[in-house]
Amino acid sequence: MKIIQKGELSLSAIFITTPLDEATIASLKAGDRVFISGIVYAARDAAHKRMIEQLAEGKPLPFDLRGQTIYYVGPTPAKPGKVIGSAGPTTSGRMDKYTPTLLDLGLKGMIGKGYRSQEVKDSIVQNKAVYFGAVGGSGALLAKAIKKVEVIAYEDLGPEAIRKMTVENFPAIVINDMYGNDWYEMGVEKYRISGDESKRE
């Protein structure tokens, strides 16, 4: 873990690599700021739907899910000299109905934006996985952390094809950890408590 100093504040930045192992996942807590390096797979709702359909037909998936991380993104076309276009996260809730099945098959990490359903959060705990939040609205900035991209399946889906991406220090924050903590809920509770205290002053 590396400590980044910023004025009088110190923020702990945790550098992790994929595929994710049990020790790494166990060390992460909701609210942790992380930088991810390694292989991450890009897949949105259309790709998730097709993967579930393939499983129902008894067909193998395009890649081995065990230990892997999926980024919920449908990147824009790459400009000349770039490996990828804007690559901001899409709303994770679109994947909720597919996620528990993929977690049961060994998926360990997910990157997106927004809340997850209770079923997904329960499955994260049961399967000892983690959900990261990427910064919404900064797709161009996030794209800079993506160093290599290869379409590996469902090319007909265009932006929603499954892509194998090599990332370097991709910034994210732990939203749901394997212990059942939810950073969004923690933030709301902290705000409520501070509001109650101000009323008493």
Image (cartoon, rainbow, N blue to C red):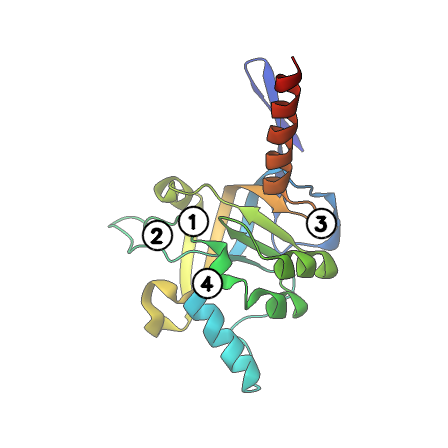
Q: Residues within 10 Å of mark 2 (few under 14, many from 20)?
A: some
Label 3 vs label 1, nearer the camera: 3
Label 4 vs label 2, nearer the camera: 4
The image shows residue 14 at horizontal and vertical percentages of 63, 37
Which residue is label 3 attached to? 180
Which of these two is toward me, 31 or 156?
31
Q: Earlier in the sequence, mark 4 or mark 2?
A: 4
Tell me which amino acid carries mark 3.
Gly
Q: Are marks 3 and 1 in contact (CB under 8 Å)?
A: no
Q: Quadrant of the N terminus?
A: top right
Which residue is label 2 attached to? 83
Which of these two is toward me, 115 or 189?
189
Q: Evaluate whether residue 93 shows in this view.
A: yes
- Whether 59 is drawn above or below 156: the answer is below
Q: Residue at x 60, y 29 (%)?
A: 191
Q: Are marks 2 and 1 in contact (CB under 8 Å)?
A: yes
